[in-house]
Each structure stands twice: as structure tokens, then as C-alpha cells.
Amino acid sequence: MTSSLGWALADGWTVARRTLIHWRMQPGIVIFGWFFPVLMMLMFGALLGGAMEMPDGQSYYELLVPGIFTLAMLFGLEGTMTAVATDVSKGVTDRFRSLPMSSAAVVLGRCIADMLDSVVTLIVLIAAGLALGWRWHGTLPEALAAFGLLLLLRFALLWVGIFIGLSVKNVQSITVVQVLVWPVGFLSSAFVMTSTMPSWLGAIAQWNPMSSTATAARSLFDNPGAVAGSWIGGHAGAAAVIWPLLIVAVFLPLSARRFRNLSR
Amino acid sequence: MSAERVIVANDVRKNYRGGAEGAGLNGFDLEVAAGTVVGLLGPNGAGKTTAVRILSTLLDLDSGEAAVAGYDIRRQAREVRRRIGLVGQYAAVDEILTGRQNLVLFGRLNHLSHAAAVRRADELLQRFSLGAAANQPAAKYSGGMRRRLDLAASLIVAPAVLFVDEPTTGLDPAGRIEVWSAVRDLVGGGTTVLLTTQYLEEADQLADRISMLKAGRVVAEGTPDELKAELGADWLDLVLADPAEVPRVLALVERLADGDVRVEDLRVSIPVKDRTRALVEVATSLAEAKIEPEDITLRRPTLDEVFLHLTGTGV
Ligand SMILES: Nc1ncnc2c1ncn2[C@@H]1O[C@H](COP(=O)(O)OP(=O)(O)O)[C@@H](O)[C@H]1O
Ligand SMILES: [Mg+2]
């Protein structure tokens, strides 16, 4: 491999492997990260499950599980942010930048590692969901398409995480974002059908990119809660592709600019 | 450009966006000959880190020119990066990874094969006396060990020029001595080193030539001996017990002073040339005059005094 693209890929993989070594060195932290969404699933299932009126007496998990999948993609943002900000503040990013490797490799490594992390998170969640009685009722290709949309959302949010990680002055200020992630997650159709919300709130929630992905996934899984009365809800499949692409279109260039600005 | 000079900086200027007026570099000049160690000496905020980050291509300059190893730092940044090692002000190692894993990682990113990276890591761990801690996470290392790991990481592909930014700031004396001996070993290997420091003693110990930096400009340059000769004096400090004694003491020590005697409350500082003779004579005359000082010490000039001497203004 001598081409610069070849080296960028090889270096990207080397940078990603560094995160895989972190997993091996600190298995407790990583495993907790993978099981935290399961904990949420159990908690909300147990707390809200009884109060929830589901069509045809279905289990609340039928609605909740795809919502938690979506939420887990959103929460992945925190890991990206923290990792990026820590590397900048500890000078590791500077060390990478002083090497004769392409700066794209630094970001590529982050992408690979975080996407792998999200794949594991999803697998753990799917296993937990199946154990709790959630099923997909559609075909396997449809289910795979749903997982694809979830990972697409995660990929888009990755760039938000990189942008914020490069923007914060210190790692502590990330706490603010960690708190703000919650209302973004809740103000969506992740836990409840938006038709149960006050209409203005429901409208906002419907337009939340999280809702588009959750609704599209539910529809592909043939789970309840997929159909909604609004225009955006009716086009959830398209929205679940367009929203992430829009987010990437905004945050990828912003992140690239932040990266260049490290030298200003 | 002459092949002899591996670092050349010409009237480099840098103002941080949103930074204070005059902070950064204000006409920075530097020439470093191949195989030498140059100490960039200056107080906190003088612009040492800024200079190192610009020369190692991490930071853009506003105006001026600079070349490292014969390559323009702006137009040929990648060529420069192939030939430099950087040890930043804060040890940039991955704290979760072990010492060996760190070195293998940076070896791979320097495009060594896996086997070569492992071999090189083990060599460097031995060389910097980190063999015993090779398999411990860097988070468990002492400050001095972390610095040495950082040095090792920047030496994976023997660089033509090594930048070392304040290697001992924040280290205890033992850590400082460890790092000094590591830097001395490097120099034995013929690497050109640009080292920044706040400590006169450190520059004196490690550098062939010293450039003194103040407010983003080099205000003096020379070998440590040249600069010291220019500075001349050591200082003899007396701390008196009674303010009334100050004028009497001044009269007694005047003939021994090699320059202006300075008084600050009860402290009388006398610049002296011949350390031992001055100490004996001052002690004798004080004893004869029945003045008993609280304290009497001989010391090298502080960075403050060096700057005061060379620029006529304090730090
Ligand atoms: N990123 C920055 N933004 C604004 N001002 C900065 C920045 N970095 C350094 N400075 C200012 O530039 C001056 C020189 O800083 P620096 O090069 O770090 O000095 P030194 O390394 O000698 O202590 C200081 O006044 C510092 O406050
Ligand atoms: Mg500094």
C-alpha cells in the first residue's frame, strides 16, 4: 500500500485499533456503556409499560424497543465528544498532527471505532429486546434496513460529536451537552406515540430526527406506533435518510473547519 | 539556505485570534546549526510554546518565514513532519495504553511494519529505562517516566530535528534529572534539539547556545558562557535583622560590588565577581562591624536579573 488513500485507510484502522485496545484495557467501562441502554429499556418498560395503552393489548416493548435503539444511537454522541475532547486536551491530537499521516486518518479512526461500538450496542439491545418479548414481524431484509437506518443516524451524530469535541474549551463543559441530550431524546417518539402529547409538543417531536428514525424503524419492523397523522410522520422512511444526510452535510464541513482551526 | 542551519526563522509574527494584544510572536528570529542543542529560554508567556508549535507545523504564522530541515514550514509541511519529533509541553501519551502499546501505536503511524514497530518500541523502552514499566498503563507512570515515554514516542524514526517544549516544568527534582539525562543521551546521538525552558540552569546544563525570548522576540543570543560573561556577576544576598543596619552595610560592601547593589526591605543583593573571596570579605567586615545578618547566601543570577541586565527592564 503506497497510495495516499491506502495510507489514510491503514492509519485510520491503526487509530481505531487504539480504541479497541482501550476496550481491552478497561472492559468494565465499555461493557457498562453497552448495557446502559438495556438498563433504560428495562426501567422504562417496567415504569411506563403498565400505564401505556397499546393497541390490541400488545406489549409496550413492541413500541419501546425500536425507540430505545434510536436513543442508544443518540447517546453514542457522548462517547464521541468525550474521546475527541480528551485527545485534544491531552495533546494526543497534536502528536497525531505532527506525524506525517493524513489528518483524515485521525477522524476516520474515530468513525470506525465509534461505529463498531454502536454495532455492539445494537446487538446487545436486540438480544435484550428479543428476550423481553419484542419481535420484528416483517422480513429479515426489512429488519436489516431498519438497523441500517439506525446506524446511519449514529453516523450523522458522530459528526455532531466530533464538532462539539473539537469546539469545547475543556472536557468538563461536555457535561452540559450530556444533560441536553436527554430532552432531545425525550422530545421524540422514542417512548410514546406523539399523538398522546399536546398537539404543539407533538408537532415538535414529530419533526425531531430521532422520531423519523424511530418511526421508520417501527414501520420496517412492523411494530406499533409507526403510523402517525402528520406529513413528516407519513414520510418517516424518507426523513430517516434525509435528516442524517442533512446533519452530515452541516457538521462534516464544520468539523473539518474546526480541525483546521486547531492551527489558528 | 546553508545545509548547516536546520532551523531558520525570519521575522516570524503570530497573533492569536481573540488573544491579547502583543501575545504570541512579534518578530521572532532563530538560527540553529545541525547537531546542536539550542535552548529557548524565557518566562511564562514569552512565546516559547507558540514558537515550537509554529516550527513543528501545528500552528500557522501570520507573517515571516521559517524553514526546518531545509523545508518551508508552510508550503512543505508534510516534508517537515517527516523529519521532526515533537515533545509538547504536556506529555502527549495515551494514558490508558501501556508504555509499549503507546510506542507501537506511534510506530505504526510512522508507517513501520508491526514487527518493526514492536522491535523499535522495545529498543526505546530499554534506552529510556522504561523496560520494567513497559506493560503498565501510562496513567500509572510518574511525571518523569511519562516525559521519557513522550521523548521515546517522538524518536521512533530518528528525527533530524527534535522539539522539546518545557520538558521539566512541573516535575520534581528527581524527574528533572531523569529527563536531563535522557536529553543528554539524545544529543550524543547527533540529533539537533530545540529545547524551551523557563529555567536558566536547565538551558545552561543542556544547551550549546541559548536564545532568550521575551514578549515574542529574541532579546539575546549566545553560548551560556558568553551570556554569563555578559552578565558577569553572581549575587551575594544578605538578609539583615534591623533596617537601621542597611546604610552601614551598604558602606561596608560597596568596594566589593561588581555593579549596583540592590536593596529590597531587609535584603541587600550584591553583584560579585570572585564568589569565595567576596563571601569571606563580606563575612569578615560584617563580623568586625558587629553586624549579624539573618541570612547570607551566594546564588546565580535569576532569570529576572538576566533579563534586567540584558534589556534594562524586568520580566
Ligand atoms: N490559544 C491561544 N489564544 C490566545 N492567546 C494565547 C493562546 N496561546 C497562547 N496565548 C498567549 O500567547 C502568549 C505566549 O504564549 P506561549 O507561547 O504559550 O508562552 P510560553 O510557552 O512561553 O509560556 C501568552 O501571552 C499567552 O497567553
Ligand atoms: Mg509554554
Image (spheres, rainbow, N blue to C red):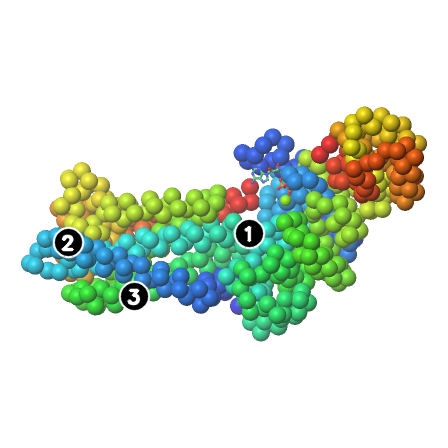
Q: Amino acid at mark 1?
A: Gly
Residue at image coords 82%, 42% = B298
User: Which residue is at the far left?
Assistant: A56
Which residue does the numbered mark 1 point to in the structure image? A91
Q: Residue A223 in the image: x percent, y percent?
A: 15, 59
Kindly identify which numbered label has been placed on residue A124. Answer: 3
* A136 displayed left or right of B191: left
Q: Residue A101 in the image: x percent, y percent?
A: 55, 58
The answer to whether B78 is drawn above or below residue B212 in the figure is below
Q: Residue A118 in the image: x percent, y percent?
A: 34, 60
The answer to whether B288 is drawn above or below residue A153 in the figure is above
Between B214 and A48, the one lying in front of the other is A48
Spatial separation of the CA atoms under disc 3 and disc 1: 34 Å
Which of discs 1 and 2 lies nearer the camera? The answer is 1
Between A2 and A9, the one lying in front of the other is A9
SS class of the residue under badge 1? loop
Q: Residue B315 in the image: x percent, y percent?
A: 71, 34
Which numbered disc, 3 or 2, marks the residue that appears first in the sequence? 3
Between B275 and A203, the one lying in front of the other is B275
